[in-house]
Image (cartoon, grey):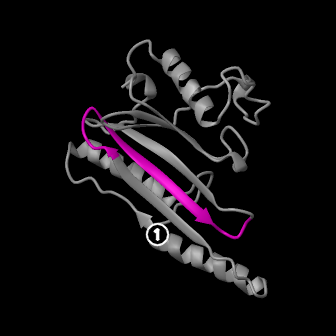
Amino acid sequence: EFTFVELVSGPPAARDRISAKIREYLESRPNDDRKLTPEEYAKSFVAGYQEVQAQEKNYDKKWYLSKTIKVLRPAAPVVSLEYSEESYMGGAHGLYGTQYLNFDAETGEPVKLSSVVKDGWLPRLNAIAEVQFRKQRELSPTANLTDAGFTFPGGRFQLNDNFGVTDKDLRFTFNVYEVGPYMMGSTTLIDRKSV
């Protein structure tokens, strides 16, 4: 199942760039250099399932693939989209993840975190996010992140570049495997002060 938005207004150059990025996320998978239309994805997906089913007697696992792109913020100065994907293809467990796509509303060019956050706020934002991360993960302010099973570089909390913008907040998502093993799941942090 593919659910996505289509831009119908705004500057043509911006609309074209953002629409191209939406297609890119629908046509490929993370760490995969294949480009497939949704129809080609469906055929390839079903063929892969049928191949495994033919090879393994009484194969009863159910495969699925879902890609969703929704709007977090539709207006200037930043258009922000949330891409999420969930899949299961017969392994030990399914996979899921969220990626935010942020664009300048006038040009359609990608927007970096430094242009969204108030000047000088990145270190403070990182500190605020760490407090929230530790609270969500039920860790004390002094708990060693490495000992707790997280894989932040150097054992120190650091925000990633996977951020989304709404009218009210700034959000970050650490996907599975990004800063810890699969069993630890993903973490989404929301900040309403830095926007």
Q: Which of the 4 image quadrants contains residue 57? A: bottom right
Q: Residues within 10 Å of mark 1 (few under 14, many from 20)?
A: few
Residue 110 spot, x, y in % from top left: 40, 36
- The amino acid on which the numbered mark 1 sits, given as a three-letter code, is Glu
Q: Residue placed at 46% from the left, 67% from the top?
A: 37
Seen in the image, is 162 located left or right of residue 51?
A: left
Q: Residue placed at 62% from the left, 73% from the top?
A: 63
Q: Residue furthest top?
A: 120
Q: Residue placed at 27% from the left, 47% from the top?
A: 15
Picture layout, residue 139 above or below residue 99: above
Residue 171 spot, x, y in % from top left: 45, 36
Picture layout, residue 11 above or below residue 122: below
Which residue occupies the foreground of this view, 50 or 133? 133
Report which residue position mark 1 lands on. Answer: 1
Q: Residue placed at 75% from the left, 64% from the top?
A: 92
- Residue bounds of the magenta highlight: 72-91
Which residue occupies the foreground of this view, 56 or 193? 193
> Is residue 86 found inside the magenta-colored segment of the image?
yes
Picture layout, residue 108 above or below residue 144: below
